[in-house]
Image: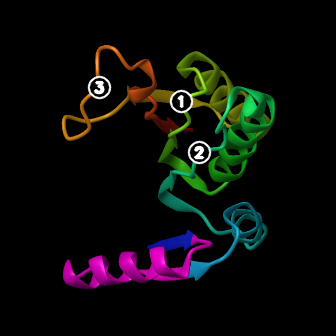
Amino acid sequence: MVAVDRSEGSLALASAAAELNGIVMETVRADSFAEMERLAAAGETFGVVVSDPPAFVKSKKDQSAGAKGYRKMTRLAAALVEPDGFLLVASCSHHMPVIQFAEEVRHGLSLAGRSGRIIRTAGAGPDHPLHPHLPESAYLKAMILQLD
């Protein structure tokens, strides 16, 4: 297992949690896009790849650039998934509509030359309730795909 993040603090917390649970995990402090490119160039593949970035779209004006970010993230992550493996892609950007997020994921898969099936689409879990009068509370989105 490999965890990639730019934040040393986040990696330290992940390492501590892994150790408490008896999981052997390598941590890499790096830009995730650059690290995914490096891993792909080295021919690395994984049975499961989780790509859960910070918000790419913090305001409406960031929507176009953020959409490209989700597309690129999916393209790079898909290259690391072994055949019949799983890819989880997530977004915590309120200003990225779920339909557009799904389209960027599809586009990223296409650019990676990958196909597969959507196993599940999801939003926030029960521990993160949505407020009926605050649509921005429904900002979490995720897709789990099995790739050919």
Q: What are the residue bounds of the magenta stretch? A: 5-27
Residues at marks 3 and 2, CA–CA distance in whole angstroms: 18 Å
Residue 142, placed above or below residue 130: below
Q: In the rendering, at what x and y percent does residue 47 appear?
A: 46, 57
Residues at marks 3 and 1, CA–CA distance in whole angstroms: 12 Å
Tag 2, which secondary structure?
loop
Residue 33, placed above or below residue 111: below
Q: In the drawing, does residue 5 fall left or right of residue 109? A: left
What is the three-letter code of the residue carrying label 3? Leu
Q: In the rendering, at what x and y percent does residue 86 appear?
A: 46, 46
Give the quadrant of residue 29: bottom right
Q: Earlier in the sequence, mark 2 or mark 1?
A: 2
Q: Which residue is mark 3?
A: 130
Q: Residue at x 76, y 67 (%)?
A: 34
Tag 3, which secondary structure?
loop
Q: Residue at x 67, y 64 (%)?
A: 32
| The stretch drawn in magenta includes residue 20 | yes
